Amino acid sequence: QVQLVESGGGLVQPGGSLRLSCAASGIIFSISTMGWYRQAPGKQRELVAAITKDGSTNYADSVKGRFTISRDNARKTIYLQMNSLKPEDTAVYYCKVVWFGVDYWGQGTQVAVSS
C-alpha cells in the first residue's frame, strides 16, 4: 500500500532553518509528482511546493526564495529545505502524492516558528 512518512519538523526561532523529509513506498516514485502542503490552525491546507518526475518545481508565492523542494529517487524521498523561517510558516506540513487518481497523504510533521 502507499505510505508517506514525514520527518524533520520542530521548533525553530524566526530566521532559522529546517529540512523536512518525506519517504514514500508503494508507488513508482521516479515517475510521481510529489508535493508539500501545510495547514495552519484555523486555515485551509495549502500547497507549499511541488516537484515533478523531471525535477520541475513550483512554489507558493509566500515561500519563493526561502524554501527549496528536491527529490532523491534512489531513496524515494523528497525534501523541503526551509530557510529564513517566519512565524507565519508555523503549520503542520504534509507530503502528498496522487497515485492512480487517488490522493495519498502523510501523517504530517509540525513546524513551529517562535522566539
Image (cartoon, helix red, strand yellow):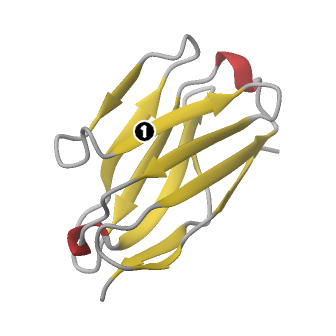
The residue positioned 46% from the left and 62% from the top of the image is 93
Provide residue 42's location: percent of width, then percent of height: 22, 79
Closer to us: 40 or 71: 71
- Toward the bottom, the furthest residue is 115
Q: Residue 67's x, y, as percent?
A: 37, 45
- Density class for disc 1 (Cα within 10 Å; few <14, some 14-19, many ≥20) is many
| Residue 94 makes an appearance in the image | yes
Q: Is residue 103 visible to the viewer in this orientation of the structure?
A: no
- Residue drawn 36% across the image and 79% down it: 13
Quarter occupied by residue 75: top right
**Residue with the mark numbered 1:** 68
62 relative to 114 in the view: left or right: left
Q: Tell me the quadrant of the picture where the C terminus can be found.
A: bottom left
Q: Is residue 9 above or below residue 112?
A: above
Screen quadrant of the N terminus:
top right
Name the image quarter holding residue 70. Answer: top right
**Along the line of sight, the residue nearer the viewer: 10 or 103:** 10
